[in-house]
Amino acid sequence: MSKIKFAVVGFGGMGGHHARHLIRENNHVEVHGIYDIKEERREAGQEEDFKVYQTLEEVLSDKEVEAVLIATPNDSHKEIAIESLKAGKHVVCEKPVMMSVSDFDDVVKVSEETGKVFMTHQNRRWDSDFLIIRDLYNKETIGELFQIESRVHGANGIPGDWRHLKAHGGGMLLDWGVHLLDQLLFMIKSPIKTVYSDMSFVLGDDCDDGFMSYIIFENGVRAHIEVETSNFIKLPRWYVKGYKGTGVIHDWDLSGELVLQRETDVKHEPTPIQAGQGLTKTMAPPSEEMTERRSLPVVEAEYESYYDNFFNVVRQDAEPVVKNSEVREVLVLIERIFESAETGKTITY
Amino acid sequence: MSKIKFAVVGFGGMGGHHARHLIRENNHVEVHGIYDIKEERREAGQEEDFKVYQTLEEVLSDKEVEAVLIATPNDSHKEIAIESLKAGKHVVCEKPVMMSVSDFDDVVKVSEETGKVFMTHQNRRWDSDFLIIRDLYNKETIGELFQIESRVHGANGIPGDWRHLKAHGGGMLLDWGVHLLDQLLFMIKSPIKTVYSDMSFVLGDDCDDGFMSYIIFENGVRAHIEVETSNFIKLPRWYVKGYKGTGVIHDWDLSGELVLQRETDVKHEPTPIQAGQGLTKTMAPPSEEMTERRSLPVVEAEYESYYDNFFNVVRQDAEPVVKNSEVREVLVLIERIFESAETGKTITY
């Protein structure tokens, strides 16, 4: 079957990454050309020997182009997506896919009407750290997981482009938040019960520079999701608790471990420790005999890579790994998180 | 001035600690005798050559006894405190001082009527880890602190005595929680705006074996307070963020550090890193030139030790370090936390 020819619309950081690596390095898709609203970026594309379109109309009227990759500022995704679908192109759209659930519904409707594929690029479903946690969750390696803490901490603030402007869909909830929430809902197949959230505005931007969200699922799982950009020391990327142990992944390097309660008939009491001004047995380390340390598992995704899947969705009517119904649920959750942070109240689903 | 003679009522873990160490080792107070409702504990006291009372009435009718230390299960504090005050004794009461705000008000009323001192033993105001954080807060060493995370993680569950029975005032909110909340409110002199909380019941007890509480103060400070007893890996004891840096204290050994933003005119951009499936500049470590590592300060309390202070309150009408108005505020907060966890809602002050 022939490769799918992509036009990359938006040749900034992410568009460039798709054009130079993600699309180029996949065997089933290829970059036919690039377009950016900014002249200097079009020139940069020319210097890299990409075919460069001068207008979006030119992209959409090129019969050779079968699919469009949208990597423009968030507030422009909707219009470009709808125009592309109506021009008969399939669409892969960067995250956060839309600024609202209703915008997303409008786009999916056009996708259904035109019969063209619309897929969101939630690439962090393939992150190794996430795959490890998902494996722990599915296999119950440390018992049934009941607490999942997923944090991304940076110290560099928000990059100085449209990402720190609310009107363009800036802010950390829509940026890194959408990844962490997508991972969470992809992993936990249970309805949400309640959401509480708070946002930080310490950098002085008009959009959030970080947020925390505490999500209680119907199945009892508690999730703490947090993104921050003013943390000079990081808390672990993942911290999870199961009924038989605890797991931690410190950072992108996948350093971390599992500590499990050892199954034994003999109960070895912990030795009380001096903690500050008092003695404590409750907070003493468990005796060595009572626990067992294990390495984190090495995990591969059991689902195919993003562009392989996109190809099969388009050519073979395969099921998308990133389903629009899932993406929509994440957007619903994002709206609930904004609402909770703005009102200070818990939102009940 | 003569020493204050104490009767220790409740000769379990904490009562024994007061009798053998805290009271005995202080120059202004002394143990006159001990009493416990359990015969085996009275016998244990006898073997250690303490004067042992056979009944509470015997304690209270002993004219030599000037003060009573209450270290009995939480649900019995109120009655013993009121009887002791009415018998003309000063009272030091272990934490959690009472099961409710209204019980506390009843006891304070009797204290005022009798003119006898009633003080709660919130000893963790003298913990070195807390003193370091309070110092950072007061001196703004890493800028004004706006986020304070205080966690105590154990892996041993709740000790197998009355502490895991709700009727006796068991559970971690009343146990370690009262310490962490007392430290927080002693440090932050601002009204509370909202409280959100969730409790864990993973051990199968009828009281909480852990809780998290997210508190927003009127002055903008966010506090995350957490006690858990099923964590085989610990998160740091303290994690705090200021406008100029981040601080961490890992454990009771006071290991930890401060990382500050270096004040410089030249901005060194961070180098993007590969994080999972994507590149990120936002979450890249800041360049070395942009940050500065410092050791944690060594801090002594500027207020006198607990029993020195108690002595001066009784003998010299000094101001108590642990004021009843402060203790009451902590109890109010605890009731709000229970309410939030039970209803799933944010509580607005």
Image (cartoon, coloured by chain):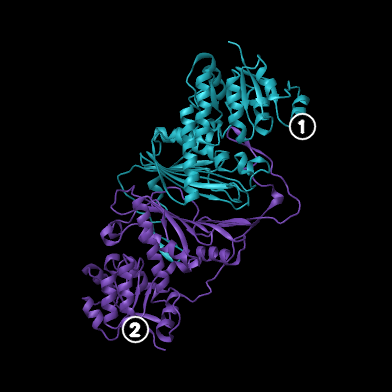
Chain colours: A purple, B cyan
The image position of residue A160, as x and y in percent, is 29, 56
Q: Which residue is mark 2?
A: A115
Q: Looking at this rendering, what residue extends furthest in the top direction?
A: B1
Image coordinates of residue B66 in percent, x first then y, are 61, 17
Q: Residues within 10 Å of mark 1 (few under 14, many from 20)?
A: few
Residue B205: percent from left, percent from top: 63, 49
Q: Is residue B295 visible?
A: yes
Q: Give amino acid for label 1.
A: Glu
Q: Chain of mark 1?
A: B
Name the residue type under label 2: Gly
Q: Are marks 1 and 2 in contact (CB under 8 Å)?
A: no
Secondary structure beneath label 1: helix
Q: Name the residue located 40 percent from the left edge and 69 percent from the top edge.
A: A327
Q: Classify 10 Å Cα crowding around label 2: few (below 14), some (14-19), many (20 and above).
A: some
User: In the image shown, does B79 or A9 lie closer to the viewer?
Assistant: B79
Q: Is residue A321 above or below residue A100?
A: below
Is residue A74 found left or right of A122 in the rendered image?
left
Residue pictured at 38% horizontal, 49% vertical: A230
- Residue labelled with disc 1: B40
